[in-house]
Image: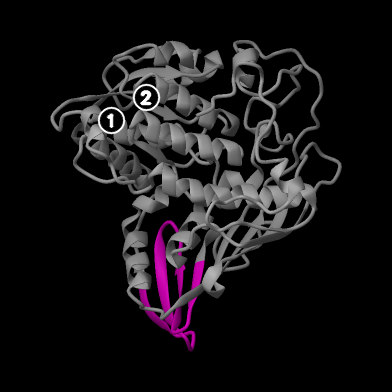
Amino acid sequence: MAMSAKSYTNIIGANDRIHVAIAGLGRRLNAFKQPIALKESNVKLLYLCDVMESQCIKGLKEFRKHIDYNPKLENDIRKVLDDKDVDVLINATPDYWHTPGSIMAMQAGKHVYVEKPSSHNMYENEQLVKAAKHFHKVVQMGNQQRSSNHTIDIIKEIHSGVIGKPYKAVAFYSNGRGKVPLQKKAAIPKGLDWNLFQGPAPRREYTSETWNYNWHWYGWEYGTAEAGNNGTHELDIARWALQVDYPQQVYVEAEKRHFLEDGWEMYDDMEATFKFADDKVIKWDGKSRNNYSTYGAGRGTIIYGTEGTVFVDRNKYKLFDKRGELVKEFDSNSKEAGNVLGGGGDTSTQHVQNLFETIRGKAKLNAPIDDASVSMAMVHYANIAYRINKGFDVDDTTGIMYDREAMALWSRTYEPDWDIKF
């Protein structure tokens, strides 16, 4: 995302320390320990923020293994954003909080690292990009493979013609997630601010198992299903490799196929197809609860070209000629987590550091939000096609869907006073 001259008035001096706050202290917390603790990052953690008191205590305990000072603990993100000393918000809250929380941060003068999926729906996708431009803020999405050196290298080779014309990419993810408890009315867990947890979502009574990760699978008020939870990463790599933006057609085959009587409320198996101009195609094969290694790995992207094929994941790539013979292989020895809960690793560290260096004016974002939002649109298209049980055409210039039922899901219902619009 090119930055205007006015934007540079918001950039911190190259020798200045950056003050950071983290909101959301769940399973992605590991991704931020190293980039904050490293001396060369020259940052200070001012706040750890979470709506669950025990998460704050646990987060502080974990960070104290890496830093020699105590950040402040806070449960209300609004109080964190009121602190003018905070320069950057790392937004690792649940999906439905990503866009509202990030826009609130920009309104308060903060730059943002927002975890994937950066938006809950297409409306938020649009608003987040508008806000970044309006407030002239550096905003990076947590699609960390964009900062993976071996991925950057092989994508450059693809763009230089190493496999001829790339025409198709298969993005895939497999996991062996188990049963999910049925939601039942329950007492609010001790230490949880349930009202603040819900944030922009319409208010309802608390149900068991909701706050701790299973909100991902309990309907569409909070989560974005597996396409948003993990497909974001590989779909982004596929689009990057093929150099495409919005598709022209979308259709899916998806269903809940495992543990049929449990509390999982959306598909757990999906095959989505996105057709683009110039006869290019991206397919998403996501299996949440069947861990069969269809493509020889748990996750990754395969790019087919007229003269060969590339397999790339978070750790390595393999280059094949069109006869299927291995031409080149590179293993980065990356320690980036794959499909286990939590994650983090050297690629995440590089991605966060890329944000810091861009804020200082010494680098360019590897995943600027205006580009990341196009990859996010593919997630939303897939989920919408599943929800209306049919495919649709898309305006590949604007991203608008040529279907009334689909466009009815462009946005969502918000709790009064929580809808942030630009």
Taking the image as shown, residue 366 lies to the left or right of residue 251, namely left
| Disc sitting over residue 63 in the figure | 2
Q: Amino acid at mark 2?
A: Phe
Residue contact between numbered discs 1 and 2, judged by CB atoms under 8 Å: yes
Looking at marks 1 and 2 on the same chain, the residue that comes earlier in the sequence is marked by: 1
Is 319 within the magenta? yes
Image: 41 above or below 235: above
Taking the image as shown, residue 134 lies to the left or right of residue 296, namely left
Colouring of the image: one colour
Q: Position of residue 232 (x, y in %)?
A: 54, 49
Q: Nearest the camera: 1 or 298?
A: 1
Tell me the residue that label 1 is attached to: 37
Quadrant housing residue 37:
top left
Taking the image as shown, residue 121 lies to the left or right of residue 315, namely right
SS type, badge 2: helix
Circle 1 crowding by C-alpha within 10 Å: few under 14, some 14–19, many from 20: some
Circle 2 crowding by C-alpha within 10 Å: few under 14, some 14–19, many from 20: many
Q: Position of residue 61 (x, y in %)?
A: 41, 20
Taking the image as shown, residue 9 lies to the left or right of residue 128, namely left
Image: 175 above or below 82: below
SS type, badge 1: helix
Q: Which residues are magenta?
A: 302-329
Residue at the image position 42 percent from the left and 19 percent from the top: 48
Q: Amino acid at mark 1?
A: Ala
Residue at the image position 32 percent from the left and 19 percent from the top: 86
